[in-house]
Image (cartoon, rainbow, N blue to C red):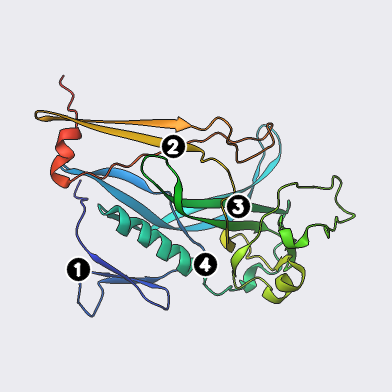
């Protein structure tokens, strides 16, 4: 195969254009495209790069969601997405990598909501709306006692909806400012309650949200984009747990020409992000990164001998 990695310079303009240059300082990019509402970022991956190590990669895909009927073994309606790769980028610098992902997420979040006139009269067989809430935690621990020195918790709320017409949706959160004033719709079969309230800080919204309505009622009122996964809202909260989910112990030992690096993950038995024992989600995909000098990479490789 003739496919190989090549060095380029990437620039993101204020207008939301992703520009690719062969070298930094050139005026005209060799490729340019505008980020759109139906673009999504893939999960980050590590791939083989060269004899010195691996490369962090990310894709920007154009995703089209459609309603499909399946008749085997019985009639079923599903909403699935079809992905088409727009571009794939990679870097060996992890800090540049996470900075690039954050920048792309910010651009997509602030894109203007555009109504597709061809789908206004779309009638779905089964209407559906999915709300995905994820917390992004970053913290710095002190050496020795593992005390939390600095931290930030950012919550990202994504929505994917298949609703006929242009209907407004209302979403409520466990916002401490509405504690005691909860309103349960008479259409709800089982009222939902919560005993854990959070205080929202620095709320930011997608352009489809009525911000004035939120500040007056603390209810998110929006006209969601049709068949398009987008970030509806983001806000910050304070980490209020008494213990961390787990701590990490690392020890390095040098014996002549050998360097031995060991790590232990110590899980806190009393920590649970979900108090409901029936719906607890285990901690998965734990990745531990040990920054090492580039010239050390080969020492951590093990070549198999046939």
The quarter of the picture where residue 274 lies is top right
Q: Say which mark, if any, is on residue 133.
A: 3
Q: Are marks 3 and 4 in contact (CB under 8 Å)?
A: no
Q: Residue at x 57, y 36 (%)?
A: 271
Q: Position of residue 91 (x, y in %)?
A: 27, 55
Q: Residue at x 55, y 75 (%)?
A: 112
Position of the N terminus, as image quadrant, is: top left
| Closer-to-camera residue (28/283) | 283
Q: Along the polypeptide, which appears first: circle 2 or circle 1?
A: 1
Mark 2 or 4: in front is 2
Q: Along the polypeptide, which appears first: circle 3 or circle 1?
A: 1
Cα distance between the residues tagged 3 and 1: 38 Å
Label 2 belongs to which residue?
Answer: 247
Vertical relation: 229 (above or below) 243: below
User: Quick check: 35 left or right of 234?
Assistant: left
Label 1 belongs to which residue?
Answer: 22
Mark 3 or 4: in front is 3
Q: Residue at x 16, y 46 (%)?
A: 294
């Amino acid at each position: 195969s003739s496919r190989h990695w090549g060095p380029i310079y990437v620039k993101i303009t204020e207008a939301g254009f992703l520009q690719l240059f062969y070298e930094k300082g050139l005026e005209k990019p060799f490729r340019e495209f505008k980020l759109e509402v139906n673009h999504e970022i893939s999960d980050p991956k590590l791939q083989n790069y060269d004899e010195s190590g691996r490369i962090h990669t990310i894709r920007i895909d154009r995703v089209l969601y459609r309603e499909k009927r399946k008749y085997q073994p019985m009639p079923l309606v599903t909403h699935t997405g079809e992905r088409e790769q727009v571009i794939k980028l990679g870097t060996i610098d992890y800090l540049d990598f996470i900075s690039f992902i954050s920048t792309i997420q910010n651009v997509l979040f602030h894109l203007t909501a555009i109504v597709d006139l061809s789908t206004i009269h779309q009638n779905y067989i089964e209407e559906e709306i999915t709300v995905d809430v994820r917390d992004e935690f970053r913290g710095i621990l002190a050496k020795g006692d593992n005390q939390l020195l600095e931290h930030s918790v950012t919550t990202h709320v994504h929505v994917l909806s298949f609703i006929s017409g242009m209907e407004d949706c209302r979403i409520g959160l466990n916002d401490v400012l509405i504690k005691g004033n909860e309103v349960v719709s008479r259409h709800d079969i089982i009222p939902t309650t919560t005993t854990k309230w959070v205080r929202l800080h620095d709320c930011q919204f997608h352009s489809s949200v009525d911000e004035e309505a939120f500040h007056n009622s603390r209810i998110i009122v929006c006209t969601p984009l049709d068949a398009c996964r987008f970030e509806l809202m983001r806000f910050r909260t304070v980490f209020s747990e008494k213990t961390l989910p787990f701590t990490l112990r690392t020890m390095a030992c040098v014996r002549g020409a050998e360097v031995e690096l060991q790590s232990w993950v110590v899980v806190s038995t009393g920590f649970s992000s979900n108090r409901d024992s029936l719906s607890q989600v285990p901690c998965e995909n734990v990745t531990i990164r040990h920054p090492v000098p580039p010239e050390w990479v080969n020492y951590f490789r093990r070549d198999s001998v046939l």
